[in-house]
Image: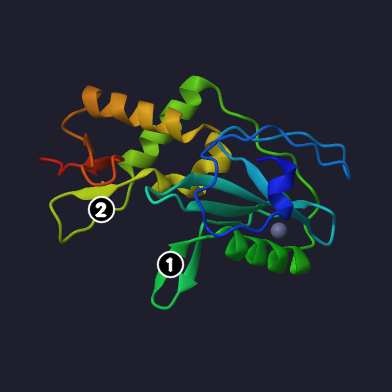
Amino acid sequence: MALIDLFTRRPAAPAAPAEDPAPRVWPEIGETWKPEGLPVAERYYNQAHAVVLVASTGRDPFGTTYYLVACLGCHFLSTRTKYHDSHIRYTLTAAAGAANEHAGTCRALPRELPARPDESTARHLLHSWVRTMPRRRDLQYTDFDLSDFDSGRLELQRTNQWIQTELEALAIEQSDLLSARTDEHTGTVRFRILPQSR
Ligand SMILES: [Zn+2]
């Protein structure tokens, strides 16, 4: 995103769909890290100067970008906010509010960004999430999409494209566990965990 975009108010036209915008330097701390797959949109500082970051994790098929909030002091991590009776993904405004609120009360000392796992570790992590996904008892199968893994994104540090490619490979490798299909209305790939025979 160009700097000018930050200062230009426009109607809600679709923004540029870049998954990983250009790195931005944060001059106040001279810091340039940008976790892969997690473009940092905003950051706040807690009472002990640990970063509370707001990072985007993806976009839905209608062009709405969603975010997570993570504290690099304590282990506070949030990907959903309560809305009436359900939990919905954060908009930027809601995420910024949650980050700011957390930063105002947290006193944990700064810790490092988690190390980026190597390829095989990342793959094992993703596969373990698939296998341990909560399954609905009343259904024969469980559908999910990439955003169901948002709470692991800081640990995984991979792009949505990487996750999707890996899941599609897993669906071929273990076709009795997982299936992948393209939703004809939205063009997104939906994944389905199949019932396990006993
Ligand atoms: Zn914290």
Q: Is residue 78 above or below residue 58?
A: below
Classify 136 as above or below 110.
below
The amino acid type of the residue labelled 1 equals His
Residue indicated by mark 1 = 87
Residue 174, position as x, y percentages in the image: 22, 27
Q: Which mark is residue 59?
A: none
Q: Quadrant of residue 108?
A: bottom right
Residue type, numbered disc 2: Arg
Using residue 50 as the reference point, say whether residue 133 is left or right of it.
left
Q: Residue at x 68, y 48 (%)?
A: 5
Which residue is painted at 82% across and 37% down in the image? 31
Label 2 vs label 1, nearer the camera = 1
Query: Where's the C terminus, which quadrant?
Result: top left
Mark 2, secondary structure of its residue: loop
Residue 108, compared with residue 114, is above or below; it is: below
Locate residue 52 relative to residue 149 in the image: left or right: right
Q: In the image shown, does 165 or 62 lie closer to the viewer?
A: 62
Q: Which residue is mark 2?
A: 135
Q: Residue 39: horizontal and vertical position, in percent?
A: 62, 40
Quarter holding the N terminus is top right
Q: Position of residue 92 (x, y in %)?
A: 59, 58
State yes or no: discs 2 and 1 in contact (Cβ < 8 Å): no
Q: How far apart in space, not on screen, are marks 2 and 1 (Cα)?
A: 18 Å
Q: Is residue 58 or residue 63 the one in the foreground?
A: 63
Q: Residue at x 55, y 52 (%)?
A: 67
Q: Quadrant of ligand 1?
A: bottom right
User: Regarding mark 1 in the picture, which secondary structure is present there?
Assistant: strand
